[in-house]
Image: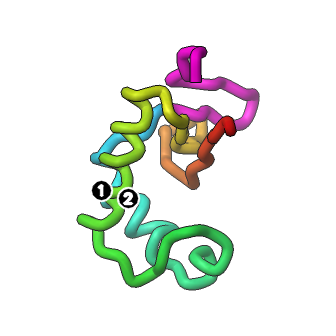
Amino acid sequence: MTEQIPEQIFTPHLILRKPAVEDGRLIHASYGSDPEVARYVLFRPDQTVQDVEGFLRSTLEAWEKSERGAWAITLPQGGEVIGMIDLRLE
């Protein structure tokens, strides 16, 4: 990518922000270990918190190289991570 990826995107109902390794514990505890959610995404529900944190580290490395952008989807009130979205320009 030649453009810089924005670290935050604001909408009236959601905030997309650059993820942090510290999000791993919450992601794992909320939706990251849910088999119903895992049916529709690329991760397995049997992953550990350390696996999720490793994924987040690789995501942040991709940010630094401007290879792709993944955002944590959060609520404006409280900032709770409720999901993630990934941008890949090919």
Q: Which residue is mark 2?
A: 26
Q: Residue at x 55, y 22 (%)?
A: 5
Is residue 67 positioned above or below 1 on the image? below
Q: Residue at x 38, y 58 (%)?
A: 26
Is residue 63 positioned above or below 41 on the image? above
Residue stretch in magenta: 1-17
Q: In the rendering, at what x and y percent does residue 71 appear? A: 54, 39
Name the quarter where the N terminus is drawn: top right
Give the residue at the far front of this rendering: 90
Q: Residue at x 61, y 74 (%)?
A: 37
Give the residue at the far left of this rendering: 50
- Dominant secondary structure (helix, strand or loop) of the stretch shown in magenta: loop
Quick check: 7 left or right of 29?
Answer: right
N-terminal-most mark, 1 or 2? 2
* 84, 68: nearer the viewer: 68
Q: Residue at x 52, y 43 (%)?
A: 72
Q: Secondary structure at mark 2?
A: helix
Q: Residues within 10 Å of mark 1 (few under 14, many from 20)?
A: some
Q: Which residue is mark 1?
A: 53
Q: Which mark is residue 40?
A: none
